[in-house]
């Protein structure tokens, strides 16, 4: 990822963090609008703390874009937990869409194609790591049966 893209992501995310509660609430609103069937996955979750966990996880990744290897193990552990939560591979695309819609609403006309592409590539990289780890986790479980 080039320096310009990293800077765009970090600056825009810093702005999102100043309105993180609203942004996180908007994100889940978009997510459940895109796929109402996802709601039951969060039945046991305290949405307030869930919203903050999501923002904290994104903050961690966005903060470490120059040393992305250091967050791969964190994402892998997170991915395996997500399998236990009932998250399926196809859900990552829905979450990505909800994230982009949230950013688009939050930034309005300032959500330029360049900024959109920067977020698409960041989310694409994060979800690729998580999906691969989830697949390996499932393969390990299958082998143990
Ligand atoms: C970039 C991708 C994602 C990130 C960074 C992320 C982040 C997180 C974090 C940090 C937690 C809390 C984990 C814990 O407390 O152990 C969590 C929980 C959860 N996430 Fe994600 N997540 C991602 C993708 C997804 C996707 C695709 C779904 C599918 C809808 C999803 C659904 C959930 C659910 C159901 C929980 C558990 C809620 C509960 O019952 O407490 N996440 N996520």
Image (cartoon, helix red, strand yellow):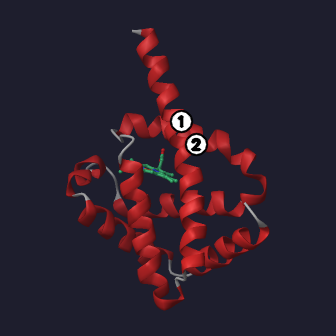
Front residue of this view, candidates 98 and 56: 98
On the image, which quarter does residue 115 sit in? Answer: bottom right
Mark drawn on residue 70: none
137 vs 64: above or below: above
Residue 114 can be seen, yes or no? yes
Place of residue 15 in the rendered image (x, y in percent of width and height, measured from the top left): 59, 81
Residue at (52, 83) in percent of width and height: 111
Q: Which residue is mark 2?
A: 129
Label 1, residues with CA under 10 Å away: few <14, some 14-19, many ≥20: some
Pointer 2 residue Cβ closer than 8 Å to ligand 1: no
Residue 56 can be seen, yes or no? no
Place of residue 9 in the rendered image (x, y in percent of width and height, measured from the top left): 65, 71
On the image, which quarter does residue 104 sit in? Answer: bottom left
Look at the numbered disc 1 and give the secondary structure of its residue: helix
Q: Is residue 68 left or right of residue 17?
A: right
Residue at (59, 52) in percent of width and height: 125
Which residue is farthest bottom?
Answer: 109
Residue at (74, 45) in percent of width and height: 69
Place of residue 24 in the rendered image (x, y in percent of width and height, measured from the top left): 43, 70
Place of residue 91 in the rendered image (x, y in percent of width and height, measured from the top left): 36, 48
Label 2, residues with CA under 10 Å away: few <14, some 14-19, many ≥20: some
Front residue of this view, candidates 75 and 49: 75
Q: Quadrant of the C terminus?
A: top left
Q: Which residue is mark 1?
A: 132
On the image, which quarter does residue 76 sit in? Answer: top right
Q: Are marks 2 and 1 in contact (CB under 8 Å)?
A: yes
95 vs 76: above or below: below
1 vs 139: above or below: below
Front residue of this view, candidates 50 and 131: 131
Look at the numbered disc 2 and give the secondary structure of its residue: helix
């Amino acid at each position: 990822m080039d320096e310009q893209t990293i800077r765009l992501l970090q600056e825009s995310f810093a702005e999102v963090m100043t309105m993180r509660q609203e942004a996180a609430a908007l994100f889940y609103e978009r997510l459940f609008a895109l796929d109402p069937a996802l709601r039951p996955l969060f039945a046991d979750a305290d949405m307030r703390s869930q919203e903050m966990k999501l923002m904290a996880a994104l903050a961690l990744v966005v903060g470490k874009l120059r040393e992305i290897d250091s967050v791969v193990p964190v994402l892998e552990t997170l991915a395996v937990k997500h399998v236990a939560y009932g998250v399926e591979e196809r859900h990552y695309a829905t979450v990505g869409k909800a994230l982009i819609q949230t950013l688009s609403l939050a930034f309005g006309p300032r959500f330029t194609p360049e900024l959109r592409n920067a977020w698409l590539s960041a989310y694409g990289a994060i979800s690729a790591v998580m999906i691969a780890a989830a697949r390996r986790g499932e393969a390990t479980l299958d082998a143990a049966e």
